Amino acid sequence: MTNKVKHYIKEILVFALVIIIFANAMSLYKSLDLSKEPLPLTNISLLNNNKYIISNSEPTLVHFWAIWCPTCKVEASNIQSISENYNVLTIAVKSGTNEDIQKWLKENDYNFNVVNDKNGLLSSNFKIGAFPTTFIYDKNKNLVFSDVGYTSTWGLMLRMWWASL
């Protein structure tokens, strides 16, 4: 490998590291104003009119998103993956009617639990200022992690694992 190629690889890696640090710093800054209270929900009605009961024995991920949010669309597959192994409740904020959201879920082959927060009341109670926003609560409904912005599947899995300890 030539010195020029090594130089470019090094520059790319440094740039990627700077971007990762910046993104995490922004997420931390944006999450400072989020609600730090224990999970206030016990059961809630989903889009399909089923009741979702928050587990008292396992951690729960609560994810605020919107169908109009570009980052949310990219992160949705991560939420789908997590929902296959963990308790996940997603809240679609100001995303239209139940039918609009169900259509979007079907078009993208997602089946995670969704609450329609038509007027943004739930997001207001959690002090959401940007989307997507994710909260992870332990089995006692205490907040363990909060994150604003994109989070990878591995990042979510690691946090859920940690919350279950």
Image: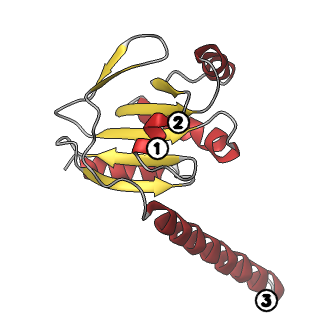
Name the spot of residue 119 as percent of width and height, x first: 55, 31
Residue 111 lies, in percent from the top left, at 52, 21
Which mark identifies residue 88?
A: none
Query: Mark 1 to mark 2: distance in Å?
Result: 6 Å
Mark 3 surroundings: few (<14), some (14-19) or many (≥20) residues within 10 A: few
Q: CA distance from mark 3 to mark 2?
A: 54 Å
Which residue is under mark 1? 124
Q: Residue sitting at 47 percent across and 35 percent down?
A: 121
Proximity of marks 1 and 2: CB atoms separated by less than 8 Å: yes
Total marks in image:
3
Find residue 14 and report its image quarter: bottom right
Going from N to C along the chain, the mark reached first, 3 or 1, is 3
Q: What amino acid type should be assigned to the residue bearing mark 2?
A: Gly
* Mark earlier in primary sequence (3, 2): 3
Mark 2 nearby-residue class (10 Å; few <14, some 14–19, many ≥20) = some
Q: For this rendering, which residue is in front, 155 or 128?
A: 128
Quarter of the figure that contains the N terminus = bottom right
Q: Residue at x 34, y 15 (%)?
A: 51
Which-is-in-front pick, marks 3 and 2?
2
Please name the residue that numbered disc 2 is placed on.
120
Which amino acid is tagged 3?
Answer: Asn
Determine contact: label 3, label 2, CB under 8 Å: no
| Coloration mode | secondary structure
* Tag nearer the camera, 3 or 1: 1
Which residue is tagged 3?
Answer: 3
What secondary structure is marked by label 3? helix
